[in-house]
Amino acid sequence: MNRETNAHRARVALVDFVSEAIRRADVAPSDACLVVDSALEVTTDQTCAWHTVVAPRDCVIPQAEGVKAVQPKMTVVAVVDGVGSGINVNPLAHAARREVPLTVIVWNGAHARTRPLDVCEIAAIHGASYVARCAVQDGDVTDHVEAALRATGFSLVDVWDGLSDSGLPIGILCERSATDAFDPPLPVRNPPSAITNPPNAPPISWHGRTEIRIAGSTGQGIRRSVRAVGNIMTAGGLFAMQLDDAGGRGFSVSELIIDHRPIRYGGVDDPSLIIVLSQAGIDRLGDIGPPTPKRRILVERSVDLPAARLDVERFDITACDGPTGRQWAVLATMIRVMIRAGWVEPESLLRVAEANMPHDRDAAALAAVRHAAHGV
C-alpha cells in the first residue's frame, strides 16, 4: 500500500512539474492540453486547469498529434509511461522526423528499470529540437519541461524517479534552433557485431554520408534490394540506415543512408542518387527536382515525365536483369550506378558480398552483384 501511495504522489508531482513549466512559459491554461497515458492513472482535472485527454497506452502520441492538428495554436504535452514509450516508439520517431510541434514527457517510476530502447537517442537522431533526461531528485524537471515547451518543433523529456542505477546519461542531450544544422551531442555506442568486418573481407572505403532514394511499384523488389546493399555496406565496416514507405496503392519507396561514421540523423534531405522505376514511383515522389553536380537522377524509360524533366538520365530496367532475371534487377542497378559514380571499388565490394552471402538463399542476390560488378 505504501509503495502504491508513493507512486501516486510521484505521478501527481509530475503534473505539478508540468503545470509550473506551462506557467513559466507564459501559456494560458485554456491554450494547453495534456494527453496522458491511461496506465499512469493521473487525475489531472483535480490538479490543473488545462484541457486533458486520457489516451490508451498505444495511442498517446497519435492522439496528441490529433489534438495539435485540430488546434494548431494549442500547446500540447503528451505524457507516456516508461513501458508505454516502447509501444509508442514508431509514432515518436515519425513525429520527431516530421518536426511536429509537440512535447513528449516519458515518466519512469521509482521502480522502473533501464529500458532496452533509449527514447532520447531515438528522438534525437530523428531530428528533435530539444531532448533531455532528468531525475526528480535533482530538482530540475520543471526547467527541462519549460525548455522543451519553448523549443521549436518536437521535444522530449525523459523523467526518472530514481536514476542512480540506470547507467543512462542525464542532462540536455540535444538542443538546436530551427536554423541549426542537426548534430546531437549523443554518446556514440559501440557498433553492433553485425557490422564487424569478417576476417576474409577487407573494409569498404567510402567517401562520406550518402543518401539514396529508390521509388517504384510494389513487387519490384525495391526494399529487399536496398536491404541487400545496406547489408553489404555494414559487412564492409560502414554504417547504413534504411527507411521504407510502401502503401496499399501500388507504390514502394525505399531510402538508404550510408556513411563511414555512425549515422546520427535518419532523414534523407539531400539524396545523392534518385532512381525512379515506375509511374507509381514518380507519382509518389512528385517533383524530383533537377540533376545537380552532386545528384544523379535515373528514370526508367517507361515512366512518363513532363518535357521540363527531360534532362534526367534514362535507363532500361530490362538491361539490368542479368542471370537472375527481374528478381534482383534493382539490386544490380544500384550496384552498377554506385560503382560508375566512383563511390566504391568493385573488387572490394564483391569480396565483401561473397564473404557475407554464403547461403543458398543468397545465391540469386550474389549473382546480381557479380553481374553488376563485372559488367561495369
Image: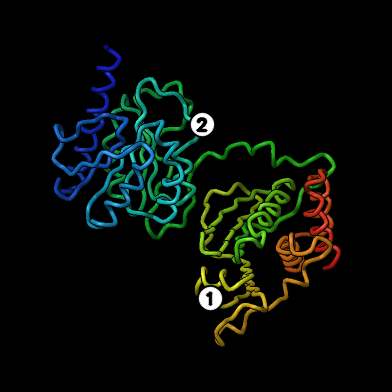
Compared across the picture, whether 111 is left or right of 43 comes to right
Model colouring: rainbow
Quarter of the rendering occupied by the N terminus:
top left
Q: Label 2 vs label 1: CA separation? A: 40 Å
Q: Position of residue 54 (x, y in %)?
A: 26, 38
Amino acid type of the residue tagged 2 in the rendering = Pro
193 over 163 or under it: above or below: below
Picture quadrant of residue 339 = bottom right
Q: Position of residue 294 (x, y in %)?
A: 62, 70
Give the residue drawn at x 69%, y 57%. 225
From the viewer's side, name the closer residue of 83 and 261: 83
Give the residue drawn at x 25%, y 22%. 8
Give the residue drawn at x 51%, y 68%. 284
Residue 116 image label: 2
From the viewer's side, name the closer residue of 297 and 252: 252
**Which residue ends up furthest to the top in the rendered image?**
1
Residue contact between numbered discs 2 and 1, judged by CB atoms under 8 Å? no
Residue tagged 1: 289
Q: Earlier in the sequence, mark 2 or mark 1?
A: 2
Amino acid type of the residue tagged 1 in the rendering = Gly
